[in-house]
Amino acid sequence: MNIRIYPDPLLRQKAKPLTEINKEVHQKVEEMIELMYEANGIGLAAPQVGWSVRLFIIDADGDKNEEKVFINPTIIEETGEVNKEEGCLSFPGIMSKVIRAQRIRAHAYNLKGQKLEIEAEGLVARAWQHELDHLNGSLFIDRMNPANRVSISHQLKEFERSYKGIQIPV
């Protein structure tokens, strides 16, 4: 399992709902968790590893016993606004300020198929919004203001030049 790097076309596709939680899903989630920690990330969406389903994992506090898996997530309420720096494992080395909601209320399912109600703020809310964007085929560069986007344009062009389109299947 590898992290897909921009401009991989799968990063721009809208992921499909996950309809069954089986042994294969559990195995892929375990691999995603391992990969997220190896890459020093706080979140990872299934499309980032070539798996086009509506699932992401988040561990915003670094407690490896507390990573969370969210299946078919939906944000139902956003409040406040904050402009903070963020990065993305699919854009290694790029950081930029992005405006996100300060607080969210959301629904999702866990690996047991139980419905979860989530209220989050700060970094967890930011991670939720970032990972949910991945499930919708949107990237954090899409949320940058024009000046920030221009400031990283040379890095984006380099990703595009070096992209080979070759990925190891998940």
Image: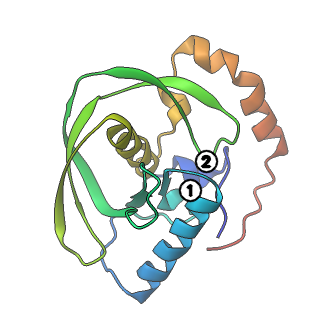
Q: x%, y% of residue 97?
A: 51, 22
- Residue drawn at (69%, 23%) of the image: 152
Quadrant of the rendering where the C terminus is positioned: bottom right
| Residue that numbered label 2 is attached to | 89
Give the mark, 1 or 2, whose residue is nearer the N terminus. Answer: 1
Q: Which residue is mark 1?
A: 48
Task: Describe residue 85's horizontal placement relative to residue 153 as left or right.
Answer: left
Element class at badge 2:
loop
| Colour scheme of the rendered structure | rainbow
CA distance separating discs 1 and 2: 8 Å
**Residue 144 got which mark?**
none
Please identify the quadrant where the N terminus is shown: bottom right
Q: Is residue 22 left or right of residue 144?
A: left
Give the amino acid type for the residue marked by disc 1 in the picture: Gln
Q: Secondary structure at mark 1?
A: helix
Whether pointer 1 and pointer 2 mark residues with C-beta atoms closer than 8 Å, the reply is yes
Q: Nearer the viewer, mark 1 or mark 2?
A: 2
Which is more toward the observer, 98 or 11? 98
**Image x and y of residue 101, in percent:** 30, 29
Residue 112 rendering spot, x and y as whole percentages: 25, 78
Q: Is residue 95 left or right of residue 166?
A: left
Q: In which quadrant of the rendered view does residue 77 lie? A: top left
Q: Amino acid at mark 2?
A: Leu
**Residue occupying the point 81% across, 53% down:** 164
